[in-house]
Image: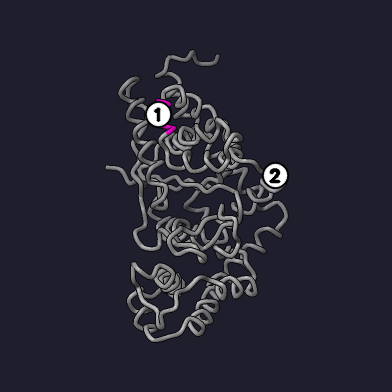
Amino acid sequence: MTNAKLRTFSGIQPTGQLHLGNYLGAIRNWVQTQAKYDNYFCVVDLHAITAPHDPAELRAATRAVAALYLACGVDLDYATVFVQSHVPAHSQLAWLLMTQTPLNWLESMTQYKEKSLRQGENVGAGLLNYPALMAADILLYQPHGVPVGADQKEHIEVTRDLARRFNDRYGPTFRLPEPWIQPEGARVMSLTDGTKKMSKSDPSDLSRISLLDTPKEIEKKIKRAKTDPQLGLSLDLDRPESTNLLTIYALLTHQEPSQVAAEFATSGYGPFKARLSEAAINFLAPMQTRYRELTQEVGYLETVLKTGAERARVVAHQTLTIASHNLGLLPPT
């Protein structure tokens, strides 16, 4: 009988600022369950270079995302925090998996179809092969589960398909991970369109509340959030903006959505938005204070990421060695 903990892996791209949707849909779940698992939390910077970007901004954002992981409550007693590009096995296993991935699997991915339309002739091979790199990220650590938002379930299914295909052809190599999706709050929607998820890639900054927004920025964004003309708020599929704002308020104040809906059933949007702004500001204040402390402590974050990468390399190398051997590659001497 073993007391070993189940292992998890997850990561977020350092593109744009992390927002409430990232926290409520993913990071909060990491923090709430981290003591139960052996966690590997990665800043997936290699994915960020599949689209046009500014190198200096990417380096700064990578550091910021790692600091926000810790500021949000990720505990180094339970988690290994590291940067994807600091563990070369991610790129190496991605290539091995690409050689085994049918092209039509990649071309059919929703993310590729949507982003390739936006990028047009500038779309690169990296975007097409994104799922193979994501599969490598996950499979390297042989996790039992991957805590992700509902929108990432397709990628986990492709990861499982690739692992199964590899195992069937070359022998037992990878564990098939399960998507661990938080049912409530997993899809926080945009402030400017309640039918679309809150996203870092949305061109409008008014669509999201970033974790590092100032109180004035939060008030401005919530004040301008899209509403409908109906008096009173309700949880109604035909009222996506009302439903989204009530859901966000419930999550920030740790209440049931139905309870919040009853409280504001006859309220106008003005008074409600004032309460929502206050709740968001109070909710983010401790996180922002901790972030400033972490980023101002000279050398601390760099030490965390160095230690995390060293730990991650040990596990990743073990998996890469097995996969390389099973494929028939000659081991180095």
Q: Secondary structure at mark 1?
A: helix
Q: Quadrant of residue 99?
A: top left
As displayed, is residue 94 above or below residue 1? above
Residue in front for this viewpoint, 29 or 6: 29
Q: Amino acid at mark 1?
A: Asn
Cα–Cα gap, marks 2 and 1: 31 Å
In x, y percent, where is residue 248? 45, 70
| Side of 39 where 70 appears, left or right | right
In x, y percent, where is residue 256? 35, 74
Quarter holding the C terminus is top right
Residue matched to label 1: 104
In x, y percent, where is residue 274? 53, 81
Q: Secondary structure at mark 2?
A: loop
Mark closer to the chain start, 2 or 1? 2
Q: Quadrant of residue 216?
A: bottom right
Query: Magenta segment, principal secondary structure?
Result: helix
| Side of 164 where 188 appears, left or right | right
As displayed, is residue 101 above or below residue 81? above
Was residue 106 drawn as part of the magenta stretch in this picture? yes
Q: Amino acid at mark 2?
A: Asp
Q: What segment carries the magenta color?
A: 102-107
Question: In this rendering, does residue 15 appear at all?
Answer: yes
In x, y percent, where is residue 297? 70, 58
Residue matched to label 2: 54
Question: In this rendering, does residue 315 appear at all?
Answer: no
Residue sitting farthest toward the front? 229
How many marks overall?
Answer: 2
As displayed, is residue 170 above or below residue 311? above
Give the residue drawn at x 56%, y 76%: 223
- The colour scheme used to paint the residues is one colour
